[in-house]
Image (cartoon, helix red, strand yellow):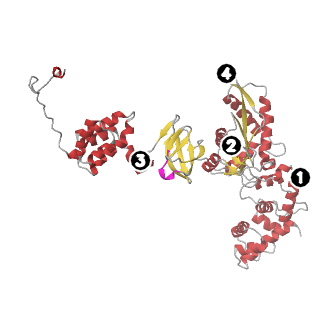
């Protein structure tokens, strides 16, 4: 039985099972192996043309095809209509498109000249085998972005006459082969992430998956099964909502699109710039961008259209939208909180909550802010400082440290004055004796806290004795208070009267000859 009669027989069977047997659409789909959507379309057309079961005797397959599909080619023919396999292959790259769907569209267009589904799939597989090996890799629209660096570098003459090599970043979309390229000073992490940001802006959206090479800036530890990504690269992926799947080590076929894209950039862009001398990175990128436009507009040799046309048809509609703000590079460093509840970044110390002492944390250093994360939760934020020093948030200190930090010389002297002038004199002497007033805080607080055990009057008299005798140790004042010396009466100063020098009982030196 011919393929076209098989197709029309299935349409008749769908109408019989629905109009006569009264089966549900899903029951008909299970029995005829036709998709639910196609059955719904057939029944909708039958309802529009007011068909009922049994069908009229004069309604043969050709007439039925013309009634249901007026625009189709219903002419009987011995030779089947060959699908355009290149168009079929391109349609399969779109999300949600299957061979079953394309075959059903094909049978509706050529109901009397079509292959069966199994023949359709077999002939497509035969056609696919005759294509280039790279065609065997199916790339969904907007799915993968392949990333790599070109091997050759481009020399740039700097202002001082120094020649610096510039690396060439290349990114290629899988479905359309639409290519982006730019020059950067290096392949370091900031340049690597910055190139990603500019590539996403060039494409106008984000793919679902990034497939980079095992560059150290992107992959901290290369592994066939469990590669470890750089934390900053993970942060960029999270910002744009993309996944990262590095190519397996020593498996260039995993990123064949990038390999071909790099080759094209080297041949069609770098080779044409080999005789030019560049004096800035911006000048080089301007030339690359002009030649890149030409490369993407160049027609394919074996396929209809160009990279730009395929990009507009396939990848652009499938790309996810860009976030509101572009990713800002943040350097990430791991550290352990010191006993003084501070972490160090570039010779500057930043405080964290004191309960995190000894814990491993992540320092995220942006252009303006330093953020500290513990267990993926932000615990501290500071304005970034570019000079050696210490930045401490008062709330991060323990309660005892916070109270100690609140003391000043003025506060200590006000407290001492409230206890008595001699106490103030002793405290002032202590503050002046040290090279830095803070060195005397403890001994002054020790004296002032004695008011918990002694009244201010005794404390003031004890300080008077200490001031008079030059005692500047706290233990001396404590000894005076313990011995109650401060409670003894003041010594009497008796004025000694002068005796007459000419008294008869007074002998002088002349009496001892």
Residue situated in front as seen by the camera: 469 or 302: 469
Question: How far is the residue under mark 3 from the one under mark 4?
Answer: 53 Å
Question: How far is the residue under mark 3 from the one under mark 2?
Answer: 42 Å
The part of the chain drawn in magenta is 351-357
Query: Dot 2, crowdedness within 10 Å: few (<14), some or many (≥20)?
Result: some
- Could you tell me residue 413's position as x and y percent? 29, 39
Question: How far is the residue under mark 1 from the one under mark 3?
Answer: 78 Å
**SS class of the residue under badge 4?**
loop
Q: Which residue is mark 4?
A: 160
**SS class of the residue under badge 3?**
helix
Q: Residue furthest bottom?
A: 21
**SS class of the residue under badge 1?**
loop
Quadrant containing the C terminus in the rendered view: top left
Q: Which residue is mark 1?
A: 130
Q: Residue at x 74, y 72 (%)?
A: 29
Q: Measured along the vertical axis of the image, is residue 53 above or below residue 471? A: below
- Could you tell me residue 407's position as x and y percent? 35, 42
Specify whether residue 272 is painted magenta: no
Question: How far is the residue under mark 1 from the one under mark 2?
Answer: 39 Å
Residue 401 circle label? 3
* Circle nearer the viewer, 4 or 1: 4
Residue situated in front as seen by the camera: 331 or 124: 331
Query: Dot 1, crowdedness within 10 Å: few (<14), some or many (≥20)?
Result: few
Q: Which residue is mark 2?
A: 217
Does any portion of residue 452 appear in the rendered image? yes
Question: How far is the residue under mark 2 from the one under mark 4?
Answer: 29 Å
In the image, taking residue 25 as reference, residue 345 lies left or right, namely: left
Image marks 3 and 4: residues in contact by CB distance under 8 Å: no
In the image, taking residue 117 as reference, residue 225 lies left or right, namely: left
Quadrant containing the N terminus in the rendered view: bottom right
In the image, taking residue 150 as reference, residue 455 lies left or right, namely: left
């Amino acid at each position: 039985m011919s393929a076209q009669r098989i197709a029309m027989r299935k349409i008749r069977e769908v109408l019989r099972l629905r109009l006569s047997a009264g089966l549900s659409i899903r029951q008909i789909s299970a029995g005829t192996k036709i998709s639910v959507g196609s059955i719904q379309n057939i029944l909708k057309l039958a309802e529009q043309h007011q068909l009922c079961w049994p069908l009229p005797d004069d309604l043969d397959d050709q007439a039925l095809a013309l009634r249901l599909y007026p625009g189709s080619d219903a002419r009987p023919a011995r030779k089947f209509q060959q699908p355009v396999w290149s168009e079929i292959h391109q349609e399969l790259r779109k999300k949600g498109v299957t061979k079953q769907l394309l075959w059903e569209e094909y049978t509706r267009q050529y109901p009397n000249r079509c292959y069966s589904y199994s023949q359709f799939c077999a002939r497509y597989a035969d056609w696919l085998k005759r294509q280039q090996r790279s065609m065997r890799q199916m790339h969904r629209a907007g799915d993968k972005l392949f990333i790599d660096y070109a091997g050759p570098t481009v020399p740039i003459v700097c202002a001082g006459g120094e020649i610096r090599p510039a690396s060439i970043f290349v990114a290629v979309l899988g479905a359309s082969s639409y290519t982006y390229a730019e020059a950067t000073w290096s392949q370091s992490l900031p340049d690597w992430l910055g190139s990603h940001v500019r590539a996403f802006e060039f494409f106008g959206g984000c793919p679902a998956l990034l497939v980079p090479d095992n560059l150290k800036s992107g992959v901290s530890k290369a592994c066939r099964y469990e590669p470890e990504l750089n934390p900053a690269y993970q942060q960029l992926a999270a910002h744009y909502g993309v996944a990262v799947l590095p190519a397996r080590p020593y498996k260039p076929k995993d990123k064949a699109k990038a390999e071909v894209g790099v080759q094209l950039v080297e041949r069609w862009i770098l080779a044409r710039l080999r005789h030019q001398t560049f004096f800035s990175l911006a000048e080089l990128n301007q030339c690359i961008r002009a030649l890149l436009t030409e490369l993407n507009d160049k027609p394919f040799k074996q396929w209809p259209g160009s990279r730009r046309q395929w990009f507009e048809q396939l990848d652009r509609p499938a790309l996810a939208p860009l976030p509101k703000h572009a990713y800002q590079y943040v350097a990430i460093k791991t550290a352990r909180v010191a006993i003084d509840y501070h972490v160090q970044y570039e010779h500057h110390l930043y405080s964290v909550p004191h309960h995190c002492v000894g814990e491993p944390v992540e320092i995220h250093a942006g252009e303006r802010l330093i953020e500290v994360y513990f267990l993926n939760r932000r615990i501290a934020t500071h304005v970034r400082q570019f000079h050696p020093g210490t930045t401490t948030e008062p709330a991060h200190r323990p309660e005892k440290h916070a109270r100690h930090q609140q003391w000043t010389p003025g506060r200590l002297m006000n407290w001492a004055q409230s206890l008595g002038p001699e106490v103030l004199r002793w405290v002032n002497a202590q503050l002046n004796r040290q090279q830095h007033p803070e060195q005397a805080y403890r001994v002054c607080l020790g004296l002032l806290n004695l008011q918990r055990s002694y009244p201010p009057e005794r404390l003031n008299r004890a300080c008077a004795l200490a001031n008079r005798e030059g005692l500047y140790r706290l233990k001396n004042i404590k000894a005076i208070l313990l011995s109650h010396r401060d409670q003894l009466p003041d010594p009497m100063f008796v004025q000694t009267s002068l005796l007459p020098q000419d008294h008869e009982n007074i002998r002088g030196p002349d009496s001892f000859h």
